[in-house]
């Protein structure tokens, strides 16, 4: 009378493939957006660290030179954002910071040993 089934039917397999396709169509854009946010956060942190390094150099030597710190090099060689630093003896101008950290797109003047970002 009843036959024992030992495998999936073709309809069941097609439904599983369709469900996996729908889930991946939802997940892949979310993953891309999360990756972009992480790259922007990395760039913001590198810019802030670079400015802090330049302020420390100014505090120690009363002048700043070219961007020698690792954070400055990593920020300028960003793969996602075009970040540019213009360094003078007592200030630095940052341009091209991501929108999330647009407050860093400014001129920072080193007038002493303490700066705040």
Image (spheres, helix red, strand yellow):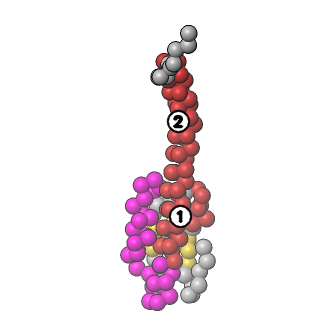
At a point 49% along the width and 84% down the height, the residue shown is 56
Which sits earlier in the primary sequence, circle 1 or circle 2? 2
Q: Which of 36 and 99 lies nearest the eye of the viewer? A: 36
At a point 38% along the width and 75% down the height, the residue shown is 68
Q: Position of residue 48 (x, y in %)?
A: 53, 71
- The quarter holding residue 114 reads bottom right
Residue 56 is one of the magenta-drawn residues = yes
At a point 53% along the width and 32% down the height, the residue shown is 20
Q: Is residue 90 above or below residue 15?
A: below
Q: Which of 69 and 8 lies nearest the eye of the viewer? A: 8
Q: Is residue 95 visible?
A: no
- In the rendered structure, find residue 114 and report the number of the disc placed on it: none
At a point 55% along the width and 50% down the height, the residue shown is 34
Q: Which of 5 and 40 lies nearest the eye of the viewer? A: 5
Q: Is residue 56 above or below residue 34?
A: below
Residue 16 is one of the magenta-drawn residues = no
Magenta-highlighted residues: 53-82
Residue under numbered circle 2: 24
In space, the residues marked 1 and 2 are separated at their CA atoms by 30 Å
Mark 1 Cα shell of 10 Å, populated few (<14), some (14-19), many (≥20):
many
Residue under numbered circle 1: 44
Left of 30 or right of it: where is 89? left
Q: Position of residue 88 (x, y in %)?
A: 46, 77
Mark 2 Cα shell of 10 Å, populated few (<14), some (14-19), many (≥20):
few
Q: Is residue 52 visible?
A: yes
Q: Position of residue 63 (x, y in %)?
A: 45, 85
- The quarter holding residue 108 reads bottom right
Q: Could you say whether the residue bearing mark 1 is in a helix, strand or loop?
A: helix
Q: Could you say whether the residue bearing mark 2 is in a helix, strand or loop?
A: helix
Q: Quadrant of the N terminus?
A: top right
Residues at marks 1 and 2 touching, judged by CB atoms closer than 8 Å: no
């Amino acid at each position: 009378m009843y036959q024992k089934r030992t495998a999936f039917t073709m309809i069941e397999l097609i439904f599983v493939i369709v469900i996996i396709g729908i889930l991946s169509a939802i997940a892949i854009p979310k993953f891309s957006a999360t990756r972009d946010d992480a790259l922007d956060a990395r760039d913001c942190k590198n810019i802030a660290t670079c400015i802090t390094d330049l302020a420390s150099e100014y505090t120690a030597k009363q002048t700043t030179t070219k961007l020698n710190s690792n954070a400055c090099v990593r920020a300028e060689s960003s793969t996602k954002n075009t970040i540019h630093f213009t360094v003078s003896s007592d200030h630095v101008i940052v341009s091209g910071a991501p929108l999330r950290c647009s407050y860093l797109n400014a001129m920072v003047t080193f007038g002493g040993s303490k700066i705040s970002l």
